Amino acid sequence: MEILERLFGSSSKVKLIKLFLFNPGSAFDSMEAALRAQISIGLARKEINNLFRGGFVKPRVYYKEIRSQKNRKPILIRKKVSGWILDQKFPYLEALEVFLSNINPFKHKDIINRLSRAGKIQLVAISGIFIKDPDSRVDLLVVGDNLKESTMENIIKTIESQIGKEVRYAMFETSEFKYRYSVFDKLIRDILDYPHEKIINKLNL
């Protein structure tokens, strides 16, 4: 990521470029872009405006689901908002996509260090976006003991902010995983029977 920061000016800009580039059909307002990139909304507005001036994104009015309350009950309402979307006419889209797709912001050690905060990790298998296999059902399989779901969600959000794409992941306690593995659970087989890399394998699979 440090090399990209030097080339593109800041890690915030790199995150936003990836967000729009790897989600070409999706529009984001400044708030959503800031949340997805895990940066401040003020910085998101500034960098998106720079990207707009450079012809990389263009304005888009779209409908967004917003949480509200009715009779003290939480509901989702659709609201028209102004946001931004990737400008498909940007002349260097293909070159930029190839370049950024070939640079992985995470080494195996980085992923392991992050995931270790969620519990006692026994198995980590990466596939999908981590090995450039678009046909994978899941990008990340995590098996461990005393796993903390909220911590895992925060870790995944951080990884997503660096990659620019949604990470599809499956998380299992060791006992549940062993049972599913023994009965040839379809999800487990769809991960382990197809291209993947085990970066932690204390279960000796």
Image (spheres, grey):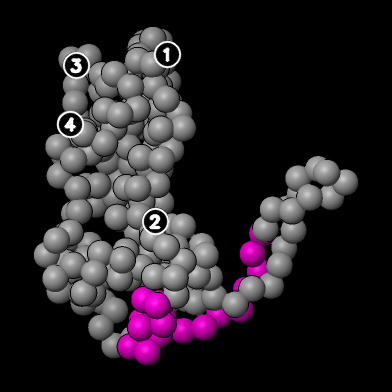
| Three-letter residue code for mark 4 | Ile
The quarter of the image holding the N terminus is bottom left
Identity of the residue drawn at 66% across and 69% down = 63
| Secondary structure under the numbered disc 3 in the rendered image | loop
* Label drawn at residue 87: none
Q: Please state the horizontal and vertical placement of residue 54, each as a whole percent of the image.
A: 33, 88
Q: Which residue is mark 4?
A: 199
| Residues drawn in magenta | 46-65
Instruction: Give the Cα separation between the discs numbered 1 and 3.
Output: 16 Å
Q: Is residue 152 above or below residue 183?
A: below
Is residue 169 magenta-colored? no
In the rendered structure, are the residues bearing label 3 and label 2 in contact, judged by CB atoms less than 8 Å apart? no
Disc on the earlier residue, 1 or 3: 1
| Structural crowding at the residue carrying mark 2, measured as other residues with C-alpha within 10 Å and reported as few (<14), some (14–19) or many (≥20) | some
Identity of the residue drawn at 35% across and 40% down = 155
Instruction: Give the Cα separation between the discs numbered 4 and 3.
Output: 10 Å
In the rendered structure, are the residues bearing label 4 and label 3 in contact, judged by CB atoms less than 8 Å apart? no
Is residue 47 magenta-colored? yes
Disc on the earlier residue, 1 or 2: 2
| Structural crowding at the residue carrying mark 1, measured as other residues with C-alpha within 10 Å and reported as few (<14), some (14–19) or many (≥20) | few
Front label number (4 vs 2)? 2
Foreground of the two, 103 or 3 = 3
Q: Which residue is mark 1?
A: 176
| Three-letter residue code for mark 1 | Glu
| Three-letter residue code for mark 2 | Gln
Q: Is residue 77 left or right of residue 2?
A: right
Q: Which residue is mark 3?
A: 202
